[in-house]
Amino acid sequence: MQCPVCGGECVRDAAEVVGTVPVVFSPCNECEAVPLDKGAPLPRDYEPAAACTCGRRFIDEVFASIYRVLREEGTIAGTEPLRAAGMPVVHPGFALATPPFLPARSLVLLSPHPDRRAAERIVREVPEVRGVVRTGQAVPGLTAGGHAAHELLAGCDVQANLFSTSIGEVVVYKELSQTHIEFPRPVNLKIAAVEREIGRHAPHTFVDACSGAGTLGLAAALAGVPEVVFCDAHGPAAFWTAANIRANRDAFLVDDIAVHAEREMIPEVRDDPVLVAEAWGDQHLLVYHGDLARLPPLLEKPERSLAALDIFGKEDRDACTRALAAWRGAGGGKAFIP
Ligand SMILES: [Zn+2]
Ligand SMILES: [Zn+2]
């Protein structure tokens, strides 16, 4: 699939990505790591080391290169600690035991500092960086009044995370400027909850009712649930859920996939659910773009369905109780908060 952001080959099949792990960020015998003090400003005379002959470079050196460009462009004063340059998000993302040695185009920088000029320089001059995103105050995604996003200033912000299930890995792509970030951890409690509830209820249909980029529904599909329905009111989430079904399709019992809308045709927010993608075979996967409150009438067998309501603000027990009651009241069937 052509990358919808940069037109390149950012989105690869899941097996290909999984095959690069764990060595993708491992040092060769010649690779050197000289840790820098992340709590102090980068010394003015510090010259970042060049990449090793294997093509990788220790993340601290990459960060020093980024910091120097931000300082030269005047977007930071140079008195800030090194870690203030921004948040590094590696591609592909998975739980790392040690700091990574980065190959080319393997890091997206999220930072409040850069302007477009600095961002373009970073992508041009720091080969490990694939994209620079300027972060705003709001968490990207749907908000009470609409939607929020960070801004992609240069390069590409498509990034994949690997999530482990008891059966295997799922690979989940998304645009970092458009969605909130979820880091892979050695144990994913939400995926464990999904597998536990599927084991308990053996549903015909699993509903990933706030799908985001599709992680929980993909885990349910991998667990062999005959039908999985994904739904999200946020356009980029619905788009990437569809893309992620395609990227992971070899792990599912599906023969054909149809995507009914291109990235630019999907509006940011939608209430009435619209089918944007579907995959068939011995399993049936459906992706709806719309409000989860309006999804239950579209379920064919709500009495045999199980929904995961991965809502924001789960700390608020009342909000969870309300969400579950609303889902059941709308005829959605069994549900749980993962
Ligand atoms: Zn791309
Ligand atoms: Zn090396």
Image: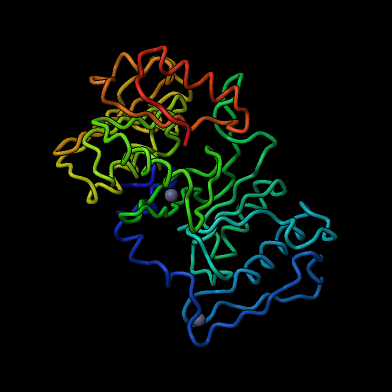
Q: Please name the residue shown 46% across and 80% down the image.
A: 54
Q: Is residue 168 left or right of residue 58?
A: left
Picture mark count: 0
Q: Please name the residue shown 33% across and 20% down the image.
A: 274
Q: Is residue 212 above or below residue 320?
A: below
Q: Please name the residue shown 42% across and 72% down the image.
A: 23
Out of 7 and 197, give the one closest to the viewer. 197
The single residue placed furthest to the bottom in the displayed view is 29
Q: Quadrant of residue 276?
A: top left
The single residue placed furthest to the front in the displayed view is 200
Q: Position of residue 199 (x, y in %)?
A: 31, 41
Q: Is residue 305 left or right of residue 126?
A: left
Q: Quadrant of residue 267?
A: top left
Q: Is residue 290 left or right of residue 177?
A: left
Q: Please name the residue shown 40% across and 47% down the image.
A: 172
Out of 2 and 219, give the one closest to the viewer. 219
Out of 259 and 308, give the one closest to the viewer. 308
Q: Is residue 292 above or below residue 43?
A: above
Q: Position of residue 334 (x, y in %)?
A: 36, 24
Q: Position of residue 184 (x, y in %)?
A: 50, 53
Q: Position of residue 308 (x, y in %)?
A: 41, 32
Please say which color scheme the image uses. rainbow
Out of 222 and 55, give the one closest to the viewer. 222
Q: Is residue 319 above or below residue 315?
A: above
